[in-house]
Image (cartoon, grey):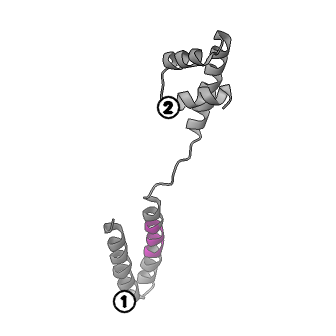
Amino acid sequence: MNKLDYSISLRAKGLGSEEIKKRMEEKGFADSEIQYYSKKSDEIFLNQSIHYKGLKSKGSNKNTLNMISLALTLLLLFSVFFGYIKIGLLGLVILWSIVGFVTRRK
């Protein structure tokens, strides 16, 4: 492992700057190297933390289901207004019962 990777891994472990300096001194880093690698590792670690995407949340499927169901509801409401009352109301009941069933399950 090179020196920069080592200092980044110490930062990722959650160590404070004093602890990082102690460990780097134990590894035989010079004072100028400690300052340089501390600064660089902070920049790289913060940059990685800011741009970390992570795992997608589990709620995204519910959100897409809700958006699709809202679009279908709007379509069914238009069908109610244009005279297809039975089809529109029946579709609304079925659609929202499915949405309620899916969102209730864990």
- Decide: is 80 above or below 58: below
Q: Residue at x 61, y 20 (%)?
A: 38
Q: Is residue 72 magenta?
A: yes
Where's the N terminus, which quadrant? top right
> Main SS type for the magenta part?
helix
The one nearer the camera, 27 or 34, is: 27
Give the mark nearer the N terminus: 1 vs 2: 2
Disc 1 crowd rating (10 Å Cα; few below 14, some 14-19, many 20+) is few
Report the span colored magenta.
65-73
Give the residue at the far top of this rendering.
Answer: 31
Q: Are marks 1 and 2 in contact (CB under 8 Å)?
A: no
Name the residue that disc number 2 marks: 13
Residue 100 horizontal side relative to residue 68, left or right:
left
Residue 58 horizontal side relative to residue 49, left or right:
left
The one nearer the camera, 28 or 52, is: 28
- Decide: is 20 above or below 90: above
- Decide: is 36 above or below 86: above
Residue 30 percent location from the top left of the image: 66, 12
Where's the C terminus, which quadrant? bottom left
Residue 71 percent location from the top left of the image: 48, 71
Describe the element under mark 1 as helix, strand or loop. helix
The one nearer the camera, 54 or 33, is: 33
Mark number, residue 14: none
Q: Residue at x 48, y 70 (%)?
A: 68
The one nearer the camera, 77 or 54, is: 54
Q: Label 2 amino acid?
A: Lys
Mark number, residue 86: 1
Which one is closest to the eye, mark 1 or mark 2? 2
Q: Is residue 81 magenta?
A: no
For residue 6, what is the image quadrant? Answer: top right
Q: Label 1 amino acid?
A: Lys
Q: Residue at x 42, y 88 (%)?
A: 84
